[in-house]
Amino acid sequence: MTMELTNQLLPCPFCGEVPRLIHWMNWKGVPTGNVNVMCENGDCPVEVRTREYKSEQAAIERWNTRINQDAPSEYPEHAQDGQKER
Ligand SMILES: [Zn+2]
């Protein structure tokens, strides 16, 4: 099950490695219910990890969010605004 979810994860933006889903446990080894995603590549220049979330899906969605994902669709709008001013 976890393997299938890992397939939904985008590669690390800094090194290209597939990140890992981490299920947190308390000191007794009991799952806390918190999940995060992190890049475990020792050669990665940045220690990339999400915050902890209450579900795998939430952690995966946050990991897969890239701030510049919808940038291309925004550029044409700005260009049009500029033309209207003229
Ligand atoms: Zn990485």
Image (cartoon, rainbow, N blue to C red):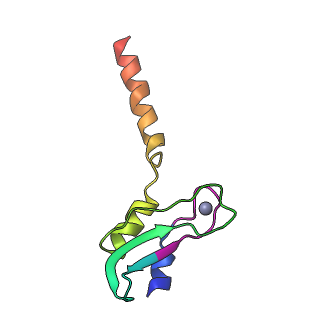
In screen coordinates, is 28 left or right of 37? left
- Is the stretch drawn in magenta largely helix, strand or loop? loop
Q: Which residue is pictured at 41% across the width and 79% down the height?
A: 23
Quarter the N terminus occupies: bottom left
Depicted 1 relative to depicted 7: above or below: below
Percent x, y for residue 27? 38, 84
The single residue placed furthest to the front in the displayed view is 27
Horizontal and vertical percent for residue 78? 40, 28
Residue 18 as seen in the image, left or right of residue 73: right
Q: Is residue 17 magenta?
A: yes
Q: Residue at x 70, y 63 (%)?
A: 43
Which one is nearer the viewer's eye here, 12 or 79?
Answer: 12
Residue 30, image quadrant: bottom left
Residue at image coords 45%, 61%: 64
Rendered location of residue 52, percent (x, y): 36, 67
Vertical placement of 22 versus 39: above or below? below
Which residue is at the far right?
43
Q: Quadrant of the C terminus?
A: top left
Count the marks: 0
Quarter of the displayed picture in which ligand 1 can be seen: bottom right
- The stretch in magenta equals 10-21
Nearer to us in this view, 85 or 39: 39
- Residue 40, given in percent of the width and then of the height, sits at 59, 70
Of all residues shown, which one is farthest toward the top?
A: 86
Frontmost residue, 28 versus 38: 28
- Asked if residue 28 is positioned above or below residue 54 in the image, the reply reads below
Q: Quadrant of residue 2?
A: bottom left
* Residue 28 in which image quadrant: bottom left
For the point 57% across and 65% down, the residue is 11
